[in-house]
Image: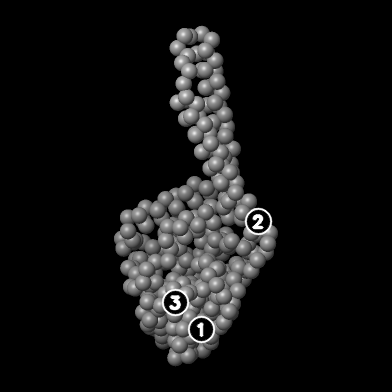
Amino acid sequence: MRKKAFGIIVPCFNEEEVLPLTFSSLITVFNDLKEDGLIDAEESKIIFVDDGSSDSTWDIISKESINTGFISGIKLSRNFGHQNALLAGMLETNFDVLISIDADLQDDVSAIKEMLLEYHQGKEIVYGVRSDRSVDGIFKRTSALFFYKLISFFGIKSIYNHADFRLLSRLALSNLKEFSENDIYLRGVVPLLGLKSSVVKYKRLKRESGVTKYNLRRMIALSLSGITSFSFYPLRLISFLGFIISFISFLMIIYVLFTVWFTDSAVDGWASTLVSIFFLGGIQLLSIGIIGEYLGKVFLETKKRPKYLIEEKVD
């Protein structure tokens, strides 16, 4: 088994509190992999990508890079988002195999060795899948379940309970570079590569320090990005909804005409009129909003702006 140039990609955004623990955990794993002969000790590195942090994240990465020799850093010029920070780490490096993992240590670093063993058995992609999410709150677990059910309903292929803890081979990275869209959703793109893959399950851990950067607003934005990038079902849903409302409206017209012509129970009123106006107005605004999401995505894609810009590197 030939030793491979191996990289660990760690996107960071305002992670100054947890970074010392992250360094310690990943360095321990890194040294164990070298001792086991699974990676090339000279060509392997840990790459931290600072996604426009406003705290001292970059200073900490720079100092650690000088102290260790196998830790490198990439500083983006501003906050480009988690997915683009991951891409920067993947596309700006040259490894035989790499693993991406978040800096918060909620993904179990002990699973890295198992993922590498799967790679050495011929797998090009290995997904880290959470088998136990008991440390997450009820809202987090419920919203995650709803998200996976929703994207499955829209016909989007994804790995259940998998986020961005994954292994990619050189071949997988080469194929990934062929996807040129600006607003990229890696959790949906990677399964489209169609290469040999496997799953490594692990227990999700409690965040050691700091606070999560994935608040409700960011989670909703990621969900919209995933749905609008891979499915046009919402547009079909608008058409179907329009058909249903038109059919109901036609039945209502028949009912109103029958009441006026053949009964004496027709009463002048405003309730039914207001309800109809608000209902149809809400549906129209919702439909315009969905169409706007797709138009906005097309607008951004046509500009061909860079996915990320690098301000500085340390090696």
Which residue is under mark 1?
A: 72
Name the residue located 65 percent from the left edge and 59 percent from the top edge. 301
Closer to the chain start, of discs 3 and 1, is 3
Q: Amino acid at mark 2?
A: Phe
CA–CA distance between discs 3 and 1?
18 Å
Visible residue check, residue 116? no
Q: Residue at x 55, y 20 (%)?
A: 253
Q: Residue furthest left?
A: 134
In the rendered image, residue 269, in percent from the top left (x then y), is placed at: 46, 21
Say few, some or many: other residues with alpha carbon within 10 Å of mark 2 (under 14 / 14 to 19 / 20 or more): few
Q: Are marks 3 and 1 in contact (CB under 8 Å)?
A: no
Q: Which comes before the other along the chain, label 2 or label 1?
A: 1
Please identify, in this view, whether the residue under mark 3 or under mark 2 is nearer the observer. 3
Q: Earlier in the sequence, mark 3 or mark 2?
A: 3
Q: Is residue 302 left or right of residue 154?
A: right
Alpha-carbon distance for marks 3 and 2? 33 Å
Placement of 313 over or under 302, stated as above or below:
below
Q: Is residue 38 above or below residue 276?
A: below
Residue 97 vertical position relative to residue 183 in the rendered view, above or below: below
Picture coordinates of residue 235 (x, y %)? 59, 44
Tag 3: amino acid: Asp
Mark 3 or 1, closer to the camera: 3
**How far is mark 2 from mark 1, CA to CA?**
35 Å
* Near-viewer residue (171 or 226): 226
